[in-house]
Image (cartoon, grey):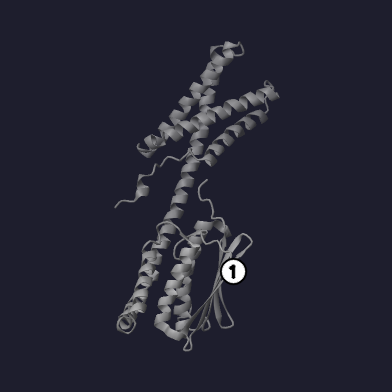
Amino acid sequence: MGDPRADEPWLPDLCRLPRLGAMLGMAQLVVVVVVLVPDAGSRWDLARVLSTSGFALWLALSVSVLLCVSRRTLSRLPRRTGALAAVALSALVAAVVAAIVHALFASVGDAGGWPSSLRFVSGSAGVVTLITALALRYFYVIDRWQAQLAAHARAEADALQARIRPHFLFNSMNMIATLLRRDPDVAERAVLDLSDLFRAALGAGEGDSSLAEEVRLAERYLGIEQLRLGERLRVEWRKAEPLPWDLAMPRLVLQPLLENAVLHGISRLPEGGTVLIEAAVDGDTLRLRVNNPSLPPHVPGVHGAGHAQRNIAHRLGYAFGPRARMTCGWDAGYYACELSLPLQPARRTP
């Protein structure tokens, strides 16, 4: 199957309100620059400024609506040809609107002759052409940059599928095979939990999860590991209600941290230990903390989980912006990782 994103129009989308506002803002900025330019032969009063602003905003709105409507059609052309066509259409619209405005002023006797009309129309079209070209180039670069960020985030999520290691699958299947005769009900529950875990891994790069789904997945993973490790693995949850259970977040954020806690912490301790998971809201921030007993970090093979942690940090940064934080460290026999997530995900498109 092909990538559905390949069919998306490449021409920047001016139908979005923030971008329409940016186009109107640039039009008004041009008016301000023109007013501020020293010119002894031109006098600006409030009425002239208002009428010029209205004309500039009308031009910007007309061009934006035209490019919004014709976006898919222009995107079917080669990019260079389509870009030139978009700019040419903008110039044509500007020329038509300027001609209409000049004709209206001429009908009331408030306009010059033919040279003045030609200068007004060509000047308006020229300015609109320049501003439109710059705006489209800017939005195009922003779109490509955001597409690269999204691709990087998807690649990070796809790489996470390999984090559920083959040895975990083999150990789980052997454990389930052992349970089949002794306790079929527990074996069935383990199979269902394992199925949910791998279903989440296979869909790691497709769509968002939620806090509730991440916690359920973590509980299933820990349930499987408890069947394998027995009394050596103890789990304690501290959920400070109310919690934003429907908060959108990337898939497989909590489970890899718990996997690290079990693999690099509990399983290396002969006596085992307790994995403590805390969830609480602090103001406008959700805090998730995973704490487990661990050997000192200088012991060979301990906490070789830097890739997983960088992976999670990158995806959280893409989803929540710079306010997302991830801190991990070892202290007095315990290793802890804490996620700080704003309750409102970042808006990734201007």
> Of residues 262 and 114, which is closer to you in this image?
262
Relative to residue 104, is residue 206 depicted above or below?
below
State whether residue 337 is above or below residue 18.
below
Q: Residue furthest front?
A: 185
Q: Position of residue 331 (x, y in %)?
A: 59, 79
Can the viewer see residue 253 in this picture? no
- The number of callouts visible is 1
Above or below, 114 relative to 300: above
Q: Quadrant of residue 49?
A: top right
Category of crowding for the residue at label 1, using alpha-carbon neighbours closer than 10 angstroms: few (below 14), some (14–19), many (at least 20): few
SS of the residue at dot 1? loop
Residue at point 55% right, 80% down?
A: 334
Amino acid found under the numbered disc labelled 1: Ala
Residue at the farthest bottom position: 270
Residue 29 in sight: yes
Q: Position of residue 341 (x, y in %)?
A: 56, 62
Which residue is at 53% across, 12% downward? 114
The foreground one among 234 and 184 is: 184
> For residue 343, which quarter of the picture?
bottom right
Residue 195 in the image: state x and y as whole percent: 35, 69
Seen in the picture, residue 329 relative to 27 is either above or below; the reply is below
Q: Which residue is mark 1?
A: 240
Residue 67 image position (x, y, % from top left):
45, 33
